[in-house]
Image (spheres, rainbow, N blue to C red):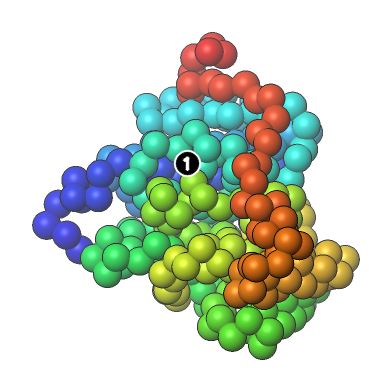
Amino acid sequence: MCDSTTDYGLLSVVVPLFNEAKNVQPLVGAIKRALNQFEYELILVDDGSTDDTFEQLKLLTHSHCVILRLKYNYGQSMALALGIDQAEGNYIVTIDGDLQNDPADIPKLIDKAHNEHWDIVSGIRTKRQDSFWKTIPSNLANSLIRKLTKIDIKDHGCALKVITKKTAKNLPLHKGMHRFICLLAQLNDARITQVAIRHNARQSGVSKYGLERTFKVINDIFTLLIWQKLKQNSDSSIGLWLLRNQRRSVQIPHYTRYNTNTKSI
């Protein structure tokens, strides 16, 4: 670790939330304990929750916290894109709101990114505490990506990542692309590494993932592979068009911004 955590500058922690009411308070408490030696902002994105997630967010008194509320459920990619768009930190941390990733692992990812000059440090979930029906699509997607791209990322689906501001701001997080942040960044020549992290069983709420997403994931993989091939041969007009399409800015929908324990601003 550096001599002082001030060497890192401001960190931005971006958390997409959809129907995670019971996890809001323990999650924010865990992040606060993990980063008590860091200067950071916490960006919580309510992705159109239909439970009491927003009510729980309004109860927070965290001094470094901002709430971004989407009126509709646009999906995790859009929620992350919004949070990253608003982030001001030198490093941007992404983490799910279900507490399956342990915020206590964040400092070691930040250390590695800073000390070894990585653009992305991504977690590898060890001893996954998920059901058979959730791990099968994930393992299939990871194996397929490794085989077809020769990129040795073992766990593309792990939400816990530390990303430099420059790399994060250039991610085209269109619908469903949050699953492939490392692959998207690699298309832009980012330096990427991995660190083993803990994985917890879900204690509250309901998982949003399952076997039915396998075909969607496979379709997205082949789309990205086309982009990768066209990058290597971008002389053709079709290749140039698709590369521009891949890099175009994500259109952020209307949202409402709140500071914790304050009125809408």
Q: Is residue 129 visible?
A: no
Secondary element at tag 1: helix
Residue 54 x %, y %: 65, 28
Between 129 and 135, the one lying in front of the other is 135
Between 204 and 241, the one lying in front of the other is 241
Seen at 62% across and 42% down, the residue is 249
Q: Quadrant of residue 212?
A: bottom right
How packed is label 1: few (under 14 Cα within 10 Å), some, or many (20 or more)? many
Seen at 60% across and 74% down, the residue is 232
Between 23 and 122, the one lying in front of the other is 122
Seen at 56% across and 52% down, the residue is 171
Please state, as top left, top right, bottom left or bottom right, where the N terminus lies in the image: bottom left
Which residue is disc 1 drawn over? 28
In the rendered view, would you say 62 is above or below 158?
Answer: above
Residue 95 x %, y %: 53, 53
Residue type at mark 1 is Val
